[in-house]
Amino acid sequence: MNKPLISIITPTFNRRDFLEININSLLNQSYQNFEHIVIDGGSTDGTVELLKKYESQYNMRWISEPDNGIYDAVNKGIKMAQGEIIAYLNSDDFYFPWTLEAVALNFTSQDKILFGDCLIIDTNTLKVKIRIHFQPSKFDYKKMVCYHGLSLPQPSTFIRRELFEVYGLFDTNFKLFGDLEFWARLGSNNINFRKLSELLSIVTFHGNNLHLLKEMGNREKENIKQKYCYRNKKRKYEFLRYIDQFNVRLELIKFLLRKDNHKHFKEKFKNINKFILFFIELLPNRVKFVLNINWIEKKEIEMFIK
């Protein structure tokens, strides 16, 4: 088994409660050759005390100082990182116990970027919603940017460090979608993205998510689109939403029928009602946003990281 050092960077600011779950998701990893670099923006909610509590329990380093937003913080972490593979995991997102082991086992010498699927826990409503966010098996940055659709799940994405050395760090002019710009930058330079059919992270939606700043987000997406899209081919991309939806549903069918897809998740959560999952995921997205249905019974978030 190849055992590369994996550097996990966590930017955070006044998210102490989420950060503790984040830390525990790393403490519970089956793969131990990693470092955790926490970049705190100068929190006043007890974050520093929390970091002091855990810093001696595993390979964790941290700093606490003002920064210029999330991508400035991530860039600081990248400069500190020593790993061959780098990822960033926001303080309100988490890993499954098998995440880093699955990455280490499957990240080949030819891979530049490896990404997987993610579990979404939405706590914005009175009833917590839990569902899998599937990605198409093929990643095409032109489709992603020119149609504001399927971006990579950033917490489930692992990057070879040389890409930052060759193509630069995250653009700090972006406050919400610097990762989207980075994927497009790499894609425009013909970097190959490979998918691993496994759930690699848990993403939480809550009342303080930065992505709720819709107006700023739309401006940033438009800026990225202007930079990387071919305007004379804009119409070409309009129909791709339907192709992408079809591809995502193909991933769902693989999940349901093939034993080797998402095997870690299937082994741990054998009580999943696959019929309900199948029914919900086949519905159009606008319908799923209206329905208030769980395909996994409501549980505490911590359950998924142990």
Image (cartoon, rainbow, N blue to C red):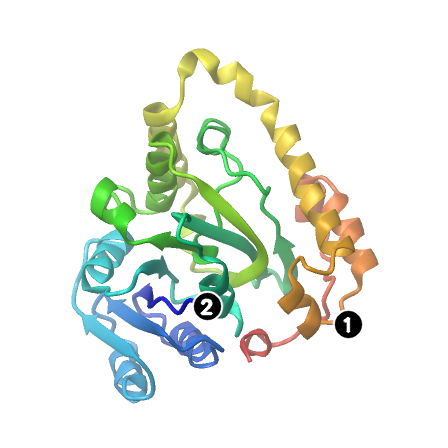
Mark positioned earlier in the residue sequence (1 or 2):
2
90, 253: nearer the viewer? 253
Disc 1 marks which residue? Answer: 271
State left or right for residue 150 relative to residue 12.
Answer: right
At label 1, the amino acid type is: Asn
Between residue 300 and residue 106, name the one nearer to us. 106
Q: CA distance from mark 1 to mark 2?
A: 24 Å
Q: Is residue 124 visible in the rendered structure shown here?
A: no
Front position among marks 1 and 2: 2
State if disc 2 and disc 1 touch (CB < 8 Å). no
Give the number of the disc on residue 124.
Answer: none
Residue 100, disc: 2
Q: Secondary structure at mark 2?
A: helix
Identify the residue shown where x is 44% and y is 80%: 24
What amino acid is found at the position of numbered circle 2 in the picture?
A: Leu
Residue 54: x percent and y percent? 32, 85
Task: Find numbered disc 1 in the image and state the secondary structure of the residue it sits on.
Answer: loop
The x and y percentages for residue 196 are 55, 53
Residue placed furthest toward the left: 65
Residue appearing at x 26%, y 85% in the figure:
49
Q: Is residue 176 above or below residue 92?
A: above
Circle 2 packing at 10 Å, graded few (<14), some (14-19), many (20+), is many
Q: x%, y% of residue 159?
A: 36, 52
- The quarter of the picture where residue 226 lies is top left
Crowd rating for badge 1 (residues with CA inside 10 Å; few <14, some 14–19, many 20+): few
Give the quarter of the image for residue 192.
Answer: top left
Q: Name the residue: 36% across, 59% down.
A: 87
Q: Is residue 31 visible?
A: yes
Please give the count of numbered marks on the rendered protein.
Answer: 2
Residue at 30% x, 60% y is: 84
Residue 68's x, y, as percent?
19, 54
